[in-house]
Amino acid sequence: MAATTPLMSTYGRLPVAFSHGDGAWLFDTQGRRYLDCLSGIAVNTLGHNHPDLVAALREQVGRIIHCSNLFEVPLQTELASRLVAVSGMTNVFFCNSGLEANEAAIKIARKYGHGKGIAEPEIVVYEKAFHGRSLATLSATGNAKVQKGFEPLVGGFPRVPLNDAQALRRVVDERPNVVAVFLEAIQGEGGIQPASLEYLREARQLCDERGLLLMIDEVQCGTGRTGKWFAHQWAGILPDVMPLAKGLSSGVPVGAVVAHGAAAEVFHPGNHGTTFGGNPLAMRAGLVTMAVMERDDLLGNATRVGDYLVQCLTQTIGGLPGVREIRGRGLMLGIELDRPCGELVQRSLDAGLVLNVTADTVVRLLPPLIFTREHVDHLVERLAPLVRQHLASSPAPA
């Protein structure tokens, strides 16, 4: 059968097209309104059509969009300085996406290992992790479904379960070529699975003991989403390498790798690069995003509104048979059911809610950081009945 679209068949798209947005609301081409509880998968930090962001981008487009990294880009220095200040780390490399940021982190770890005389460096990664879809980041990802058909995968990624400190120590003890530990502070695609604060501290201690790099992927859980600038900060630790992307520029494509200590000195001219990364438009968007977050206390808002959302969900559906757990932090939350629930995505759209399901059984909520208690009330009023209906109509696991 002939294709009906010129687009490659890479997405199972939902039958809705959005024409515009305003704050936490989206509007489709038919004029219908939806509450955005996904924010472009943790991207639209400031919601839609934020006046400060719109004005800054319009002004920047009238100045310069791109000039390449063959020249100094002052806005890169400004945004890097802000990231260094809030992270306590040392320096930054800018790219275009979370995949690219994670790829750069992998390259830092490998070059760090070669600098120590290790010819085939290895990086410990995690079950259910997701780091991207390039061959290297796909290999680091812990999802056989997305890896299938792209073998042979890149080697050098021994894998352990999350929150099992003994398993991590055992792999490090058994594999002398390990040079880094690479994990998400909260696994997003893996089902909103947080690394425990104790585990993060233990991983930091182990890396310090063995001279390993601790690399924490904050692509989805960073940039204020959990109520601190970066989710690992709840554990009071400092990583050596921190990939960022998604919410950093509120919708303008961006990626960043923030480094500290020995990792900050690994790259030299010619080791890594990018054509579009760090362009003035993305940098301006990042600066405005961070400025608005600070001015409007969006980190505090993420904590307050996130706590209220958990409270409301717990009261309305938390005790239902079939609801395993409501978990996460700030405005990065998952509702895990005891059965697949992918059909809730379409049912939620029909009810005027934009959300998604990840790991087959987890309703994922990633609303913009401008979300309010009123938005929470609207969300819970519509979502809770859908969850009840789904549990009543779908078969329970055997």
Image (cartoon, grey):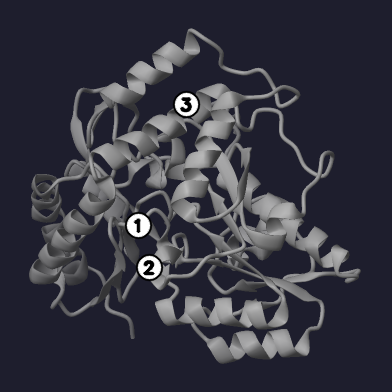
Q: Horizontal placement of 351 versus 42: left or right?
A: left
On the image, the x and y values in percent for residue 182 come to: 62, 67
> Can you tell which quarter of the image residue 241 is in?
bottom right
Q: Horizontal placement of 331 versus 131: left or right?
A: left
Secondary structure under tag 3 reads: helix
Residue that appears at 62% across and 39% down? 94
| Residue at numbered disc 3 | 284
Q: Amino acid at mark 3?
A: Arg
User: How many other residues sit within 10 Å of disc 2, few (<14), some (14-19) or many (≥20)?
Assistant: some
Q: Is residue 92 above or below residue 77?
A: below
On the image, the x and y values in percent for residue 250 come to: 40, 35
| Residue at numbered disc 2 | 234
Identify the mark nearer the N-term, 3 or 1. 1
Residue that appears at 28% across and 51% down? 299
Q: Amino acid at mark 1?
A: Lys
Contact, mark 1 vs mark 2 (Cβ under 8 Å): yes
For the residues marked 1 and 2, what is the alpha-carbon distance in whole angstroms?
Answer: 7 Å
Q: Amino acid at mark 2?
A: Trp
Residue that appears at 24% across and 45% down? 297
Look at the image and tell me in which quarter the N terminus lies.
top right
For the residues marked 3 and 1, what is the alpha-carbon distance in whole angstroms?
Answer: 22 Å
Look at the image and tell me whether residue 389 can be seen: no
Residue nearest the observer in this picture, 342 or 261: 261
On the image, the x and y values in percent for residue 28 come to: 27, 27
Identify the mark nearer the N-term, 3 or 2. 2
Look at the image and tell me in which quarter the C terminus lies.
bottom left
> In the rendering, which numbered label is found on residue 16?
none
| Residue at numbered disc 1 | 228
